[in-house]
Structures are given as C-alpha cells and as structure tokens.
Amino acid sequence: MWFFLILLFINTILLQAALSPADTFFKKKNCDSQCIFNKELSLESISSFPTNCSRVCTFLSLNEYSGINESKLTNLFKNVKVLIGGLSVSNTAFTSLKFLAPLEGIECSDDVGINIQNNNEMVDTGLINLKTIDCPTIFISAGFQMTGLNVPKLERITYNLSQNIGITIMAPLDTFCITPIETRKFLSTRSPSLIGIVTAYCKPKNDSKLCNTPAEGCVEIYGNVVIGPTFDMSLMKNVEAIYGCLIINGTSLSNLNAFEKLHYVAHLSNGKPAIRIENNLLLTNATFPMLKRVYSNTIDEIIFKNNSEELLLDPFLCYGLRNVLSMDNEDAPTFDGETCEQVEKSAPERNVTYMDGKSKSATMVNNFHECFDFLVSVVIFVVTQL
Ligand SMILES: *[C@@H]1O[C@H](CO)[C@@H](O)[C@H](O)[C@H]1NC(C)=O
Ligand SMILES: *[C@@H]1O[C@H](CO)[C@@H](O)[C@H](O)[C@H]1NC(C)=O
Ligand SMILES: *[C@@H]1O[C@H](CO)[C@@H](O)[C@H](O)[C@H]1NC(C)=O
Ligand SMILES: *[C@@H]1O[C@H](CO)[C@@H](O)[C@H](O)[C@H]1NC(C)=O
Ligand SMILES: *[C@@H]1O[C@H](CO)[C@@H](O)[C@H](O)[C@H]1NC(C)=O
Ligand SMILES: *[C@@H]1O[C@H](CO)[C@@H](O)[C@H](O)[C@H]1NC(C)=O
Ligand SMILES: *[C@@H]1O[C@H](CO)[C@@H](O)[C@H](O)[C@H]1NC(C)=O
Ligand SMILES: *[C@@H]1O[C@H](CO)[C@@H](O)[C@H](O)[C@H]1NC(C)=O
C-alpha cells in the first residue's frame, strides 16, 4: 500500500516536472502538438521549426546570438498567421520584422509580451498584417534608424482582465513619429492599462474628417483646440478625438454636453497638460459625456482652475476623470491646485459655506422683496392719502 502511494507520488512529481509552465500554457491554448516549438530558435534548432503551421506555439526570441538572416526567417515564417506565446526581438541588425509580415495575431502568456528594443538598424516593424494583440505588455523602444511603427492594420489590443495591460512606445528621436490612427488604437485599449507614448505625431493630411483646425464635420482634430467666449460649440458635435490639447477658457458654458462624442484627448508635447479648463464661472457640470482616455506626457494631465465653485463640492468628478488617464497618476487631475483627495477632504466644509452663502443670498432676495413690499405699501399709502 505504502509502496503504491509513494509510486503515485513520484509519478505526479514526474508529470509536473514534464509539464513546464510553457507546456501548460500551450495546452490551455489548444496548441496542435505538431505546431509547438518549445526551444530557442537558432541555426541548430531551425530545422525542427513547424514551418507548415499557420498557428505556431512558441516563445519567439531573436537576438544577437540567433545568427539567422532575414531571408531565411522569411521562409521560416511564411505560413505563420497566429503566434501563441510571445515575441522578443532585441540587439539584432534587422531592418524590420517584415519576415513576420504574414502574422495577423499574437497571443501571449501571462509573464511575457511583445518586446522590441536595441535594434539599431530597424526602420520600422513591418508587421503590416498584424490585427490583434492579446498580450499583457507591449514594449517598443526605437533605435536611431526607426521612422515609425508601420502597423497599419492594428485593430485591437486585449488581455485577460485580471492583469493590467502595459504599453510603452519609447521613441524620443525626431526621426520617428506615430500616426494619430496608431495612437487612437493604443488609447482605445481597455482600462486598466498603463500607456506611455514618448514620441511625436506624424503630421496627418488635413481632410474633411481629420482637420487641422475645428470646422464643420470634423471627426478628429490634429492640433490644439482653444475654446474661448465666442467659440461656436456646434463644431464639436462630431469630434471623437483631439490629437493636441483642449483648452476651455473664459466661456459661459454651464456643462460640457457639447462634447457629445469626445472619446480621446492625447497631447504628446512634453510637459503640457492635455486638458485645461479655466475661468468658466458658470460651469457647474464638468462631466464629458463620452470621455474614455486622456493622455499627456506630464503629471498635470488635466487642470481645472477658477470655474464654478460647485465643481469643488463633488470629489467624484475628480476621481472619475482620474480613471480616464493613461498613466497611473495619483496627483491628477487638479482643481484649483488641489488633488482629488484634497477636494474630497475639503468638500463637506466647503459645502456648508457654499450652502450658507446660498441661503444668505436667498435671504437677501427675501429682504429685497420685503423692502419692495414696504415701498409698495408706502406708495399705496401715499397714493391713498392723496
Ligand atoms: C510541409 O508541407 C510540405 C508541402 O505541403 C510537405 O512536403 C512537408 O512534408 C510538410 N512538412 C511537415 C513537417 O509537415
Ligand atoms: C542567409 O543564410 C543562408 C544560410 O543560413 C544562406 O544560404 C543565404 O545566402 C543567406 N542570405 C543572405 C541574403 O545573406
Ligand atoms: C484570466 O486570469 C484568471 C486569473 O489568472 C484565470 O483564472 C482565468 O482563467 C483567465 N481567463 C482566461 C479566459 O484565460
Ligand atoms: C484644411 O484646413 C484649413 C484650415 O487650416 C481649412 O480651411 C480647409 O477647409 C481644410 N481643408 C479640408 C479639405 O478640409
Ligand atoms: C485664459 O485666458 C486668459 C485671459 O485671456 C489668459 O491670460 C490665460 O493665459 C488663458 N489660459 C490658457 C490656459 O490659455
Ligand atoms: C476667474 O474668471 C473670471 C471670469 O473669466 C475672471 O474675471 C477672473 O479674473 C478670474 N479670476 C482669477 C483669480 O483668475
Ligand atoms: C452632468 O453632465 C453629464 C454629461 O452630460 C450628465 O450625464 C449628467 O447627468 C449631468 N449631471 C447633472 C447633475 O446634471
Ligand atoms: C451640501 O449640503 C446640502 C444641504 O446641507 C446637501 O443636501 C448636499 O447633498 C450637500 N452636497 C454635497 C456635495 O455634499
């Protein structure tokens, strides 16, 4: 009996040892055993790569030691449409990843993602058919030669809700730019996700939908939108995205309902807030009806200053806006220099003063009425006396 149990025990241990985390993951993903490549890709292992499979399960890692040239890789990956595992390309001399051009989808396991860095000859990714990314992290750091991402078909970035998604595009050199369309794809990633886009926009062509200045029919605006007292708010009716900052200054707006379709505001200039709302004394409701994501490369992503006092009575306005920020930032937004926590702390006391003020002005109105009544009665008295 004991012998049997011990045997069983040893057996389970052996089984567990045989099923590495990678095996477990590939099993969960229903990988065809013929299409699993659970090795490091190298000149030695290349002959066992499942070239015929369109759905390949492997943690693909190419680096300075891989020693395989681009034409060989092109042939190797010519049938790969879906990559299950992860993708890392670093320290190579590849000019792009166009050997993976047939690739349409990447599905990653929990602790890996997409990592592209230190490739000093790389001009762009060349992942021209990539549509879906189901990965917890995307990290792309551009080298000196890189001019853009070149992922024209990218549609969706997803991952299991139990994890944050982290996206970093690091390309501070002015030879590189990101298109507004690519930016929007990253911004539309579900929350929670942390997004860092350290680069500049590619200047898009001005057309009737993507405008350089607000005009009738614009759906997206590339450039800063400054709304002052005389701005025609109907121009904002169809606007879904602003690639630049949004300033609302000195208007008589009482709410932001005119931004009925605004989903994204992303300002890539360093140190500049994405949204500033200042000097709008009648603004009592500052909720954007559809806002999903606000991005800027500063800790002051959204600033409110000198608007209606009512905005300082409701900390949930501030917390709600914090939820649409792309970076995990406990200091934004600010209302007259206060963080959400500070607004929350002062709200009850402020509300008392505010309500007091209201009742005082109400009494003043009443006094005025009394005074008026008195005047009227005096007039009536005088008239009757006459
Ligand atoms: C791949 O496909 C080719 C042609 O369709 C066939 O000759 C070859 O045997 C296949 N290789 C494997 C490993 O299945
Ligand atoms: C790529 O490497 C293969 C052998 O691995 C070689 O036959 C081929 O000529 C190389 N191609 C180029 C363009 O260097
Ligand atoms: C998501 O992650 C949780 C926790 O790790 C796991 O239990 C669940 O099965 C995952 N869902 C899917 C669809 O993989
Ligand atoms: C391009 O932008 C200008 C303003 O900068 C505007 O007057 C013009 O109508 C725009 N062209 C198109 C095709 O939208
Ligand atoms: C708002 O308008 C005032 C007065 O015109 C100006 O001084 C201030 O710089 C403006 N603020 C912003 C953020 O543009
Ligand atoms: C607040 O905004 C009002 C209206 O635009 C303006 O008259 C006033 O000077 C502003 N106050 C401060 C302290 O900026
Ligand atoms: C404030 O504006 C938002 C967005 O338009 C709206 O959903 C909400 O009901 C408004 N709140 C109040 C108290 O009117
Ligand atoms: C402010 O006080 C009034 C009356 O005391 C109360 O009805 C209201 O809910 C309070 N508002 C906030 C935001 O605390």
Image (spheres, rainbow, N blue to C red):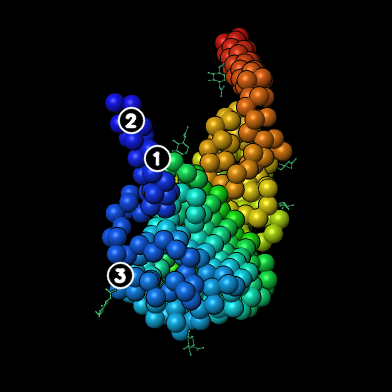
Can residue 42 be seen by looking at this rendering?
Answer: yes
Badge 2 amino acid: Phe
In terms of secondary structure, where does tag 1 sit? helix
Provide the residue designation for mark 2. Answer: 3
Of tags 3 and 1, which is closer to the observer? 1
In terms of secondary structure, where does tag 2 sit? helix
Q: Quadrant of residue 382?
A: top right
How dense is the environment of label 3, judged by Cα within 10 Å: few (below 14), some, or many (20 and up)?
some
How dense is the environment of label 2, judged by Cα within 10 Å: few (below 14), some, or many (20 and up)?
few
**Which image quarter is the C terminus in?**
top right
Real-space Cα distance between discs 3 and 1? Answer: 32 Å
Of tags 3 and 2, which is closer to the observer? 2
Residue 235, horizontal then vertical, whole percent:
48, 59
Badge 3 amino acid: Cys
Q: In this view of the protein, which residue sits in the foreground, 89 or 158? A: 89
Which label sits on residue 199?
Answer: none
Give me the residue at 35% from left, 65% from top: 56
Provide the residue designation for mark 1. Answer: 13
Residue 20, horizontal then vertical, whole percent:
42, 49
